[in-house]
Image (cartoon, helix red, strand yellow):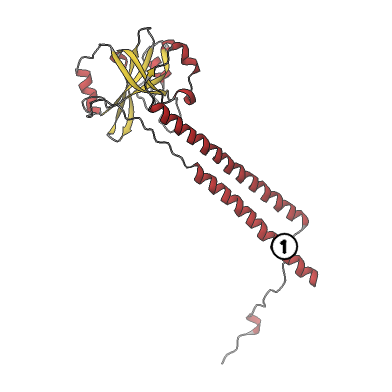
Amino acid sequence: MTRPDPSLQRPADDTPRRPRGNLTLVILAVIALFLFAVLCTLGTWQIHRLAWKKNLIAQVEGRVHAPAVPAPGRADWAALTNDNAEYRHVQAEGVLRHDQQTLVQAATELGSGYWVLTPLQQADGSLVMVNRGFVLPAWRKRAEAEPADTAPVKVDGLLRMGEGPGGFLRENDAQADRWYSRDLPAIAARRGLDPQQVAPYFIDAGATAARDPATAPVGGLTVLSFANNHLGYALTWFALAIMVLVGAGIVAREELRTRKRQGGR
């Protein structure tokens, strides 16, 4: 039987690890404390966001199901914000300016098409943009061929603050009259409307009898669901913070064992 050549055997390295220096331990402790503080801060921030989101959902539910109130007049426009006005149930009366309407590209449960954004001229001369609903591209040719109704109307729906440029929406091309967001000042400028006369909000019209977006705008499609993942995010951050503490504890335990072995020699 052939024996292995002793020269080819590598002796096991039984040399114990030396303890880390005090400076190294201090640096590791500072890093661990920093990570722990940052992760706890992020978790706490998500808890605050969770409370804010729950309050927002409750506010929206209350506003949506409340009786309709008159849409804010010109004197109230400057004070309107997303927090105090978004999703109010409102009513407005006037004449729809079909000659100044704008089609904003959209995708809904009914397919890909457009929101029909039409100015509503009120008795005091002010204009409120009304999202009359969703239509398919086939409606566009039908609308161009049919005469527009100029009779006074009453609009009932949800107040929505205008959508500014940016975010996840494509950039509007006002020159080519291609719109991807309901940027009210830009649309008003493109239509030659006086910006002082145009409200900073639009009204999402409520549901109507029309249910065929190829023949008429379909209203009542406002999305009222809000993603609420803040609790999951908070638990993730706090779990990572605990993992940092566990890791620091393991390092400290191994360091104590190493120093005890060194001290016993």
Left or right placement of residue 179 versus residue 18 in this view: left
233 or 21, which lies in front?
Answer: 233
Residue 260 in which image quadrant: bottom right
At which x and y percent is residue 35? 64, 47
Residue 14 horizontal/vertical position (percent) = 70, 74
Residue 114 location in percent, x, y?
30, 27
**Residue at the extreme front:** 67
Quarter of the N terminus within the rendering: bottom right
Circle 1: element type: helix
The residue shown at (73%, 66%) is 258
Amino acid type of the residue tagged 1 in the rendering: Glu
Residue 195: image x %, image y %? 43, 12
Crowding at dot 1, Cα within 10 Å, few <14 / some 14-19 / many 20+, comes out as: some
The residue sitting at the bottom extreme is: 1
Kindly tell me whether residue 167 is visible in this rendering. Answer: no
Residue position for label 1: 255
Query: Which residue is more in the foreground, 186 or 8?
Result: 186
Residue drawn where x is 57% and y is 90% of the image? 2
Q: Is residue 77 above or below residue 179?
A: above
* Apparent side of residue 11 relative to residue 57 in the rendered image (left or right): right
Depth check, front residue: 245 or 258: 245
Q: Is residue 105 visible?
A: yes
In the displayed structure, would residue 189 be above or below residue 169?
A: above
How many numbered marks appear?
A: 1
Quarter of the image for residue 106 reads top left
**The C terminus lies in quadrant:** bottom right
What residue is drawn where x is 77% and y is 58%?
21
**Name of the residue lying farthest toward the top:** 124
